[in-house]
Structure formats: structure tokens, C-alpha cells
Image: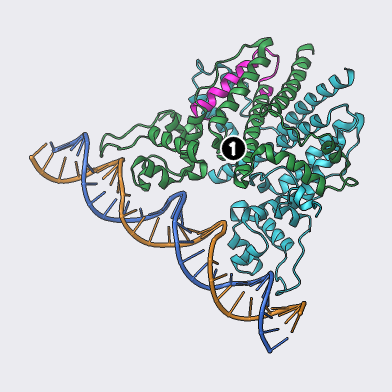
Chain colours: A cyan, B green, C orange, D blue
DNA sequence: GCAATTAAGCGTATGGCATACGCAGAAGGA
DNA sequence: TCCTTCTGCGTATGCCATACGCTTAATTGC
């Protein structure tokens, strides 16, 4: 008996197989009354409307008119549902951007697209990473990002590192944004009220002798003026892509 | 009656006042049997030992030999406790680095120090941000970071943006690292087992025709080789500081 | 010394959560 | 017709945050 693939290769995690539609149904037994895609869609809609905290197994089931435990016929644990929700929330990535010298506009467009997706589904960044990306849409996003870096002279390992850095930046920005929004909603103040107040509070609490640099920032009025919601994102993205550009230039001229 | 500070200035949030030690105790009534600092220390120790999920009000109280509701005499809600825990976990920042041309080594040291603090207390990045930093240690970290940028020609607003970008990078790296560790612990596999497996799984699931760039990465063996745990952090930090350097040079030569 | 005041510690109750387990019944194959 | 297999689901367990109000300790004003 020759070795089969099943013995030489690691098995696909069940949730990955499900995401790629590789589950085969046994012919016997009653027809399923629900579908995995329907469960995921209901959970995504619920998270969009009421936040990730509202996504409990019983609540999703109620939304579908089913009992809580019925969901466990489709998903072995809540973690699996979350993984599938994230993949669905990402959806189709933007088309591959230009390669070669256009890498920068391509990657910038990719980053803005991820940001837009995370603004549509802010709860995505609250779902703990369960491992490196293996689900269909996640891999498509990675693929299209990597394509922007073709012809830049970067090594394959460097390309992956750039993508990791970029998606990390976008995700962190989205996490910060939603956390600030939630905190301001919880405190009942609007964000444009909070920032000027913040400057005053820091000034009150931070002794100028011990916090001189901070005091200069406050005196410059940085904390009082409001900037457009995109300004901070643009700044960070520009720095980050500048850093990548420095590396690419070094690889090209070397 | 002339306007007092209390009328013209926003009030300090209670948790901020507590963190700066500004709570005055009424002389009457029984002596407190617990201290805020003691509660925070117990909660930090518990989070270090068993993770943030283990930090429930009843569990912290049990650790202190008190009843659950006793804690609510010191903290108005769990969120307040979490805020104080984070501040305690950061602790003293590294001394201010050199200014002027040494900004880069100073900021790099700052970033490594924050990373070290987050490795000591991985749960910190799981605590939702409740607002801009106002607690003592948080402000000290910000202060010492800003000092590195003195004499670089950056505007005050740009200095703040750089610090936001840098701390975001470090925190995101820490979040990713702990999530991967937790996921690998939950699956019972070691991380150095997972990565080679991951390459094989991607290869199995990703059609080379549809995922050419991804396939190149896999074929280069990027996903199979393990790099030192710091390599990825070094790469991102270098790119990020390169990007800041580009900006500083533009401000200097202009 | 005594009464009034104030805050500390805490017992109880509420409503929600994930999910292990096992049963009833449906669908198809033999 | 009977047997296998799978679906839907009811129940039970042990957690969680925290609102409310009682008892009691420590102090002040008389």
C-alpha cells in the first residue's frame, strides 16, 4: 500500500474545508434546515447592527428562528463561526494594482480598500486571529497585495513582511478608531468635544517641569484642533510606504 | 462670585484622579481594609499568571480574601480597574534618549522597551482603549518618546503622529504575537510545527493559476523556514523609522 | 460619653453566556 | 420493513457584572 496524501500531508482544519466548500454531505439522514452560509450571513448582519458582543450562539439562532444547539451541527464551536464571519466580511479584494514602478499606488489602494472593509465591519478587528490566513477571501487579499510588489526587486520573504506590516497598520488604525468611537459613545460625549477637553486635562495633570515635551505639544494647540478623520491614516500610510520605498531603492541600486 | 476652576475646566474622570493619587478620603467611617494599589496589583498578577479572561471581579476579590462587592468601594466598574491595570503594567518608561541626530536610536530604544513591557504583560493589548492617555505612566512614556524628536525640525503635530504610529506598531506586533501563541497553544501544536504545515496547506488550497504571487512565496520556502522571533519586529521597525527619517530629512533640507 | 453621620464590607438576586449530553424523529439504503 | 445516520433541540452546569440595601465600624459635634 503506497502512502496516500492523507498520510503525508497535514489535514485541513475543518473550518478551512468548510470555507472552501469542501464539505461533503452524507446521503442519509434528514435534510439540513439551515445552511452554513446563511448562519454566517445572519451573524455578520447581527455584528454589523449591534456589535460583536451581541453575537452569541443563542442570539444568532434566534435570528434564524432555530434553537441554539442547532448551530452546532454546522460549526463545532463559536471560534469557527467567527473565522467564517471574518472571511465573509473581507469579501472580494480590490483588483490587483499596477506592478513594477506602480507598486506604491497599488499598495496604497489596497490599504484604503482594507480600511474601507474594516469600516463596514468594525467588529472584524476584535476577532482574535486563529492562525495565518487560509480562508478564500483572506488569501485573495494577500495575493493581490503581493502582486503589487512584483518587479520591485524585493525578496519573497520581504514581500510577505511588507504585507504583514501594511495590514497590521490598517488593522491597528481601525481598532483604535472603533475603540475611540465606542468609548466616546459610552461616555456620552462627541469626539469633537473630547479632544479639546483632553488637552485641558493633560495640562492640568502634567506638571510642566516633569513633562516639558508634552507641554510644548499642548501649547501648540495640537490636542485642541481637530483634524479630518483621514489625516492621521494618511500620515501613517505615507511614512510606512516611504519606509518601503527606501528598502526598494536599496535593493534596486545594489 | 468669580468663576472657579471647577466651572471653567472639565472635571477629571474619577479613574484619572485615582491614578494620580488625588482621592481624598473622608475622615469618618470605618477604615478601608483594602487599598486601590493592592487591588490593582492583585489583578495584574492574576492577569500575568492566567490571562485577562481570568480577571473577574469575583476572582480578584477571592485573591485578596475579600467579597466580590467589596471591590466596588474602590472602583466604580471593571473598566476602571482595567485602566489602572494597564497603567501599572507599563510602569516607568526608559530614560529619555538622545535628542537631535540621535532621535533614531532613541525612538528605537523606546519601541524595544514598550515591546518588552508588553511581553511581560501580554494582556495589556487586549484591554480596550478608553480614551487618550491620561494616567501617569502612560503620559511618561509619551513624554519620553516626544523628547527623542526634539530638534528634528518636525512640527508638534507631526511628533504626536509619529508617536501614535510607533506605539501602534509595537502594540499591533504584541497583539499578533500573543494571539498566535494562544492559538497554537489551543491547537496543541508548537509554532515551529505550524509554519511548515501552513505552507503545505496554502499550497493545497490555493490554485497556482489563481494565486500566482502567493505560489511564488510558497515555492521560495518563505513559509517553511522559521525566523527568529525578533526578525519580523526588526523589519517593521526599520521600515517605519526609515519612513520617519524621510520626513525629517524633508523638513531639514526644506 | 453619647448621638449622629458616613462609608466599608458583603449577601442576594438577575439575566446572560458557551457548550456537553442525549433523546426523538426524519431520510434514505438494504 | 428495518437499520443506519444525521438533524433539531431541551436541559443542565458553572461562570460573569453589578444593582440594591443591610449591618457595622470609625469618627465628629455636642
Q: Is residue A33 above or below residue B89?
A: below
* Front residue of this view, candidates B250 and B9: B250
Q: Quadrant of residue B215?
A: top right
> Principal SS element in the magenta part?
helix
* Front residue of this view, candidates A109 and B203: B203
Label 1 element class = helix
Q: Which residues are magenta?
A: B134-158
Identify the subunit bearing mark 1: A
* Front residue of this view, candidates B92 and A128: A128
Q: Which quadrant does the C terminus of chain B fall into?
A: top right
Residue shown at 65% from the left, 65% from the top:
A73
Residue shown at 73% from the left, 22% from the top:
B238
Q: Is residue B231 left or right of residue A111?
A: left
B211 within the magenta span: no
Q: Position of residue B102 (x, y in %)?
A: 66, 11
- The residue where tag 1 is placed is A193
B149 within the magenta span: yes
Q: Position of residue B128 (x, y in %)?
A: 57, 40
**Can residue A25 be seen in the rendering of this structure?**
yes
* Front residue of this view, candidates D25 and A217: D25
**Can residue B3 be seen in the rendering of this structure?**
no
Q: Is residue A209 left or right of residue B38?
A: right
Q: Is residue B68 left or right of residue A189?
A: left
Q: Quadrant of residue B76?
A: top left
Q: Is residue A15 above or below residue B126?
A: below
Amino acid at each position: 500500500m503506497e502512502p496516500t496524501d492523507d498520510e503525508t500531508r497535514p489535514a485541513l482544519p475543518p473550518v478551512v474545508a468548510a470555507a472552501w466548500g469542501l464539505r461533503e454531505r452524507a446521503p442519509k439522514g434528514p435534510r439540513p434546515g439551515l445552511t452554513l452560509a446563511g448562519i454566517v450571513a445572519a451573524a455578520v448582519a447581527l455584528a454589523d447592527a449591534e456589535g460583536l458582543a451581541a453575537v452569541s450562539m443563542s442570539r444568532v439562532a434566534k435570528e434564524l428562528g432555530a434553537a441554539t444547539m442547532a448551530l452546532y451541527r454546522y460549526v463545532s464551536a463559536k471560534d469557527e463561526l467567527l473565522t467564517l464571519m471574518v472571511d465573509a466580511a473581507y469579501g472580494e479584494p480590490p483588483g490587483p494594482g499596477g506592478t513594477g514602478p506602480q507598486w506604491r499606488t497599488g499598495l496604497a489602494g489596497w490599504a484604503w480598500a482594507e480600511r474601507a472593509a474594516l469600516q463596514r465591519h468594525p467588529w472584524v478587528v476584535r476577532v482574535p486571529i486563529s492562525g495565518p490566513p487560509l480562508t478564500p477571501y483572506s488569501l485573495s487579499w494577500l495575493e493581490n497585495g503581493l502582486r503589487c510588489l512584483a518587479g520591485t526587486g524585493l525578496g519573497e520573504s520581504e514581500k510577505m513582511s511588507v504585507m504583514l506590516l501594511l495590514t497590521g497598520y490598517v488593522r491597528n488604525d481601525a481598532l483604535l478608531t472603533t475603540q475611540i468611537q465606542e468609548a466616546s459613545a459610552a461616555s456620552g460625549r462627541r469626539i469633537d468635544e473630547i479632544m479639546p477637553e483632553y488637552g485641558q486635562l493633560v495640562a492640568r495633570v502634567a506638571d510642566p517641569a516633569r513633562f516639558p515635551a508634552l507641554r510644548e505639544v499642548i501649547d501648540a494647540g495640537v490636542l485642541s484642533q481637530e483634524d479630518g478623520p483621514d489625516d492621521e491614516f494618511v500620515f501613517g500610510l505615507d511614512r510606512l510606504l516611504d519606509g518601503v520605498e527606501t528598502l526598494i531603492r536599496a535593493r534596486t541600486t545594489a
